[in-house]
Amino acid sequence: MGECPKCGEEHPLPKWNPFYKNMYPSAVKDAIDTALASPAQAKMNYEKLKLKLTTLAAQRSIVVNVGKIVEEIAPGLSTFPYHRSDCRSLLDPIDYVVFDGLAQEGKVRSMHFLDVKTGASALNKHQKQVKAAIEKKRVEFTLY
């Protein structure tokens, strides 16, 4: 229940319309008109939308899982630019630290912080922070 600020009467909230009809965007007006004119059609449209969103969520889940698998097997791929024995997996927030040269030459020529990306994925917030720290040379070696 809610109290009307003008008259002070209580009414069930589902009966309230907090907007004037002319304040709705045209797409919203059309959806309201369709729902009022044909509840069965509105329900069918809702079910189609729900199915579409569920399908998209399932597809995204598959893409994310495939990406995680690729992150883990990337050093074993023939196109991987470093020797797989030079890689040490962190997987979060950055996938690998690469000690380039360690396995074949027994000495570290260079170190790389490496993240594997598939498709259109991009660095997340923490990965961007790691990248920025490296670019600004805020990297240290600490002996404990």
Image (cartoon, grey):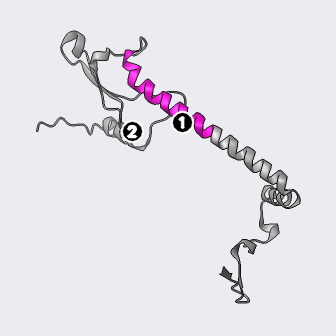
Q: Residue placed at 78% from the left, 60% from the top?
A: 25
Q: Is residue 44 above or below residue 55?
A: below
Q: Earlier in the sequence, mark 1 or mark 2?
A: 1
What segment is highlighted magenta in the picture?
Answer: 56-76
Identified by mark 2, the residue type is Gln
Q: Residue furthest right?
A: 37
- Measured as percent of width and height from the top left, residue 71 is found at 41, 26
SS for dot 2:
helix
Q: On the rendered structure, is 79 left or right of 108?
A: right
Let me know if residue 92 is in the magenta part. no
Q: Quadrant of residue 24?
A: bottom right
Residue 87 seen in the figure: yes
Residue 63 highlighted magenta (yes or no): yes
Residue named by callout 1: 61
Question: For the residue carrying disc 2, how many other residues have a C-alpha within 10 Å: few (<14), some (14-19), or many (20+)?
Answer: some
Residue at x 79% of width, y 55% of height: 27
Q: Secondary structure at mark 1?
A: helix
- Picture quarter containing residue 17? bottom right
Q: Nearer the viewer, residue 137 or 89?
A: 89
**Residue hosting label 2:** 127
Q: Exactly how many numbered labels are in the figure?
A: 2
Secondary structure character of the magenta stretch overall: helix
